[in-house]
Amino acid sequence: MHRRSFLTAAALAALLPGMGTASEGLLRRRLGRGRPVAALGLGTWRTFDHPSGSPDWEDARKTLQRFVEGGGELVDSSPMYGLSSGAVGEMARQLGVADRLYYASKVWTRGRAAGRAQLLREAERFGRERLDLMMVHNLSDLVTQLAMLREACEEGLVDQIGISHYLTQAHPEVERVMRAERLDVLQINYSIMEPQAEDRLLPLAAERGMGVLANRLFAEGALFSRVRGKPLPGFAAELGITSWAQYFIKWVLGHPAVTVALTGTGNPDHIVDNLGGARGPMPDAALRRRMREAFLAL
């Protein structure tokens, strides 16, 4: 889907008041108790689930290359994503960028033995002895898998642990888990069309010192369907925005509790465009309200 609507205005050189820090290049934020990472991440669901050497695989490889060249670091995968983890690992080794990536994946099974086997298999696919982040996918077999992941942390197999979900109706249970467990990272759905996470989950994550990975930024493409053929609001130039994708990404990153915005794509041109959403000024609360009002009015 074609999604560009370019503006001629140049980006401002500094962040608007109320936001964190940004250096030249991509905005960087500390993820939980870990190190700072670039605020635009690469999701791999469907987009990297391709056999080696296929045309789609080659496009995904080029996407990963441009992602890293543009300053991207965090790649998010899961065993339920088919071939994706292995594809990323193989591509990263071919490109010579494996050591520059932050690997985030998930455990998605039942039973301690199966969970540990899945963790070790993900590490092998990525080509790492130690994974940066492992999450319990969709809260599946939560108590058992969190205990397994904590043991893995003590062994030095995992740096940080967390939970992930993508459905708004799961937010009450996610909140319960966040309050009951010591976690480093939350991955949750959050977009200009699905903003419910900002009501309770994002403030709670900030209160508990958790990093946040935002998924479903484009609501599975529904946002682009809504804005197709429509020009960007004139005030988008204040943020250096040149596409609707950047508009949606900057709205998400404008919330200070969000660490990384995950965009799932295997299109090399789209990842370059997406990276622009993590550069330059970010909207403060007032401008974010204006952005959402303008979007809802379309």
Image (cartoon, rainbow, N blue to C red):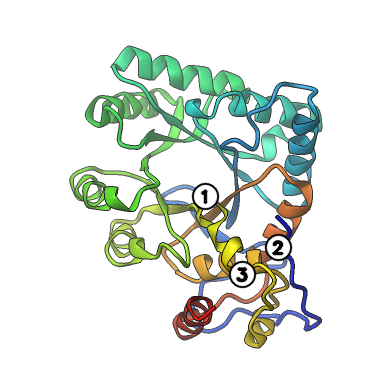
Q: Do the residues labelled 3 and 2 touch (CB within 8 Å)?
A: yes
The amino acid type found where label 3 is placed reads Val
Disc number placed over residue 3 in the picture, else none: 2
- The answer to whether residue 22 is above or below residue 265 is below
- Dot 1: element: loop
The amino acid type found where label 2 is placed reads Arg
Residue ID at (61%, 62%) = 224
Residue, disc 3: 227
Q: Residue 199 or 182: which is nearer the viewer?
A: 199
The amino acid type found where label 1 is placed reads Arg
Gap in angstroms between the C-alphas marked 3 and 1: 36 Å
Where's residue 166, x and y in %? 40, 46
Residue ID at (36%, 48%) = 167
Residue, disc 1: 35
- Res 22 seen here: no
Q: Residue 102 or 243: which is nearer the viewer?
A: 243
Q: In this view, does 88 lie to the left or right of 29?
A: right
Q: Quadrant of the N terminus?
A: bottom right
Marked residue nearer the N-terminal end (3 or 2): 2
Q: Do the residues labelled 3 and 1 touch (CB within 8 Å)?
A: no
Q: How crowded is mark 1: few (under 14 residues within 10 Å), some or many (20 or more)?
A: few
Residue ID at (41%, 49%) = 33
- Observer-side mark, 1 or 2, equals 2
- Dot 3: element: helix
Q: Are marks 1 and 2 in contact (CB under 8 Å)?
A: no
Where's residue 237, x and y in %? 69, 83
Q: How crowded is mark 2: few (under 14 residues within 10 Å), some or many (20 or more)?
A: some
